[in-house]
Amino acid sequence: MAKTISELAREGGVGVETVRFYQRRGLLFDPRPGARREAGRRHYGDDDVARLRFIRSAQRAGFTLHEIVGLIAPETTRGQARELARTRIAELDRQIAEMQAARSWLGELARECAASPEGPCPIIAAFEA
């Protein structure tokens, strides 16, 4: 059964504007007049829902939309997909290290702030510097 864009969005767990954005980026099929269109409405199928869910899952794994385009390209090989995953893992490791450093620094500032009610707040002072 054909789905409207709002039904596709709901089944994919996104908003209609997200679907349209993905269409503009070439991640989702953008139905035009023809076999999949009736009464001036664009219609989608289960394959479109599956593609939308794939995109959302890949985003949760940390892939960028540009990387997802590479993953869904029909000519992408297993080796290329594996290399995209390795690159993404390296970037996630870098981001995790950066966030751990930020957490540590913030914890230190919070301890300094709690140590004394006198003088300027060390947290605010650190961000002003």
Image (cartoon, rainbow, N blue to C red):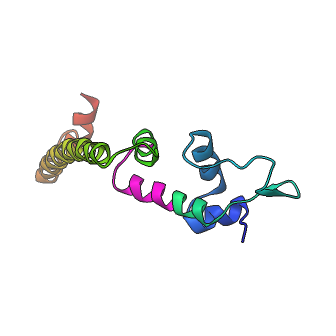
- Asked if residue 52 shows in the view, the reply is yes
Is residue 12 placed above or below 80 in the rendered structure?
below
Q: Position of residue 14 (x, y in %)?
A: 57, 59
Q: Residue furthest bottom?
A: 1
- The kind of secondary structure the magenta stretch mainly shows is helix
Along the line of sight, the residue nearer the viewer: 40 or 100: 40
Which residue: 12% across, 52% down? 111
Along the line of sight, the residue nearer the viewer: 96 or 50: 50
Q: Quadrant of the N terminus?
A: bottom right
Q: Position of residue 91 (x, y in %)?
A: 24, 41
- Asked if residue 121 shows in the view, the reply is no
Which residue: 41% across, 41% down? 70
The quarter of the displayed image where residue 58 is located:
bottom left
Look at the image and say whether residue 57 sits in the magenta stretch: yes
The quarter of the displayed image where residue 46 is located:
bottom right
Which residue: 15% across, 51% down? 107
Q: Is residue 95 left or right of residue 64?
A: left
Along the line of sight, the residue nearer the viewer: 113 or 47: 47
Is residue 128 placed above or below 116 in the rendered structure?
above
Along the line of sight, the residue nearer the viewer: 88 or 113: 88
Q: Position of residue 40 (x, y in %)?
A: 86, 53
Q: Quadrant of the C terminus?
A: top left
Specify start and end residues of the magenta stretch as a single range. Answer: 53-65
Is residue 100 placed above or below 14 in the rendered structure?
above
Q: Is residue 15 left or right of residue 108?
A: right
Look at the image and say whether residue 82 sits in the magenta stretch: no
Which residue: 43% across, 42% down? 75
